[in-house]
Image: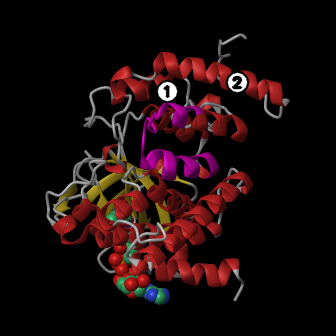
Amino acid sequence: MDCSLPSRGEWHHNRPMQELDAFRHAVRHWLEAHYPPALRGAAMPIGDLYTGGRHPKPVHPAQPAWCAAMASRGWTVPEWPAKYGGGGLSREQSAVLREEMRRLGAPTPLFSFGISMLGPVLLKFGSEAQKRRFLPEIVRGDIRWCQGYSEPNSGSDLASLMTRAEDRGDHYLVNGQKIWTSHGDEADWMFCLVRTNTSVPKHEGISFVLFDMRTPGVTARPIKLISGASPFCEVFFENVRVEKAHRVGEEGQGWAIATYLLAHEREMISGLGSLISGTALAPRALKIFGTDSDGKLRNAGLRHSLARFELDSAAFRITLAQAARTRNAAGMGAMASAVKYFGTELNKRRNELHLDIEGANALQWDARGPAGEAWAADWLRSKGNSIEGGTSEIQLNIIAKRVLGL
Ligand SMILES: Cc1cc2nc3c(=O)[nH]c(=O)nc-3n(C[C@H](O)[C@H](O)[C@H](O)COP(=O)(O)OP(=O)(O)OC[C@H]3O[C@@H](n4cnc5c(N)ncnc54)[C@H](O)[C@@H]3O)c2cc1C
């Protein structure tokens, strides 16, 4: 069988099954040749995934090479159009690629807000110049993006945001403050919501802009968390010059763009739990508690919780797979709130169960699970899952209104 891969964009979609088999064969061959041997068998929890950027901090030295190899085919973002650096693959081909990566145990080569949040926005709302400039950079992981949405008095009520952007002809002058900006101190650029008009209803006066974090007047201050890490910042803007060419969409269109991006963010967050590599819960519980005379886990309460969790996880995986099959290029829309809500609550339960199984040992700060996971820090971090990207209560409001039509 011919194992060579055609150039990007040369695959034709909707071809018969044999074509997909040939594609699988070629992908397997290519991955075996390009997946760095040094990464094989390396545990890669979510926090260790490669995020790229101007000053990348790979957890494993082979990560940049793996990212570069995949980016050379556009496979860091397999379904984006080849003309913007993406893989140009169909949904079916992209699923084959993921399956073949899983077969090798290969981690996702690049994890970025550019891929999961900004890219879909640029594809829908960006100008041709913005697409040609920013999308290939995102595919390669050249710059790392952060999200400037929340403000000290605008979280759930995001539309009340106060950061002002004054019109100065060809540019805006931005003043104000953001908060909870994940990796604001490490990111290279920010996508940011600003108020461009104060004399219209709050949702209508918002615009969506992009700027380099090195622009004079931008200051990012890390906030230390209970988990010991400092993954997010307060970011201050003092007379920051933002070119109008870097406004995405029309002036005042920011709210529509912001909510479109949020649906993609929620979809991404909903899947994070399944990316986390950790110890399987049931075998660990059996090891610690042993079995009764029927061969069942000895602790009946834990047995019940584990069974419920495993069933809910299986149902969630099927729901996610179904949603992935039926979603269109614009994403899942309001359904993203349902998977975000369920996925993040499930991830919190998984962390609670870990603690139930391991007991007080797991609360020791340096305790590590058999797969190297940091139990206490992961448990604390999981609490943020149902807050970031919009809280669980806000997701329930959206589900009630926009999915159930209540
Ligand atoms: C780990 C993490 C990472 C984050 N990263 C970013 C980032 O990169 N960029 C960014 O901009 N932001 C980020 N955030 C901020 C996040 O988006 C906000 O924390 C979130 O939207 C909630 O806003 P708030 O904290 O102001 O809480 P509030 O809005 O003050 O909410 C407080 C409580 O009131 C409830 N509540 C509020 N309004 C309603 C309502 N209408 N109905 C029912 N209940 C309601 C909420 O559910 C919550 O329980 C991050 C947050 C976390 C935890």
Can you say whether 65 is above or below 292 in the image? Answer: above
- Precedes in sequence: disc 1 or disc 2: 2
Residue 164 visible at all: no
Residue identifier under label 2: 23
Q: Residue at x 42, y 79 (%)?
A: 300
Circle nearer the viewer, 1 or 2: 2
Look at label 1 and name its amino acid: Met
The magenta stretch spans residue 304: no
Q: Where on the image, by quarter, is ligand 1?
A: bottom left
For residue 237, side relative to residue 244 (left or right): left
Can you say whether 5 is above or below 290 in the image? Answer: above
Residue 228 point in image, percent of width and height: 16, 62
Query: Nearest the camera: 190 or 327?
Result: 327
Query: Nearest the camera: 239 or 357?
Result: 357
Question: Which contiguous range is marked in magenta?
Answer: 100-124
Query: Nearest the camera: 132 or 319?
Result: 319
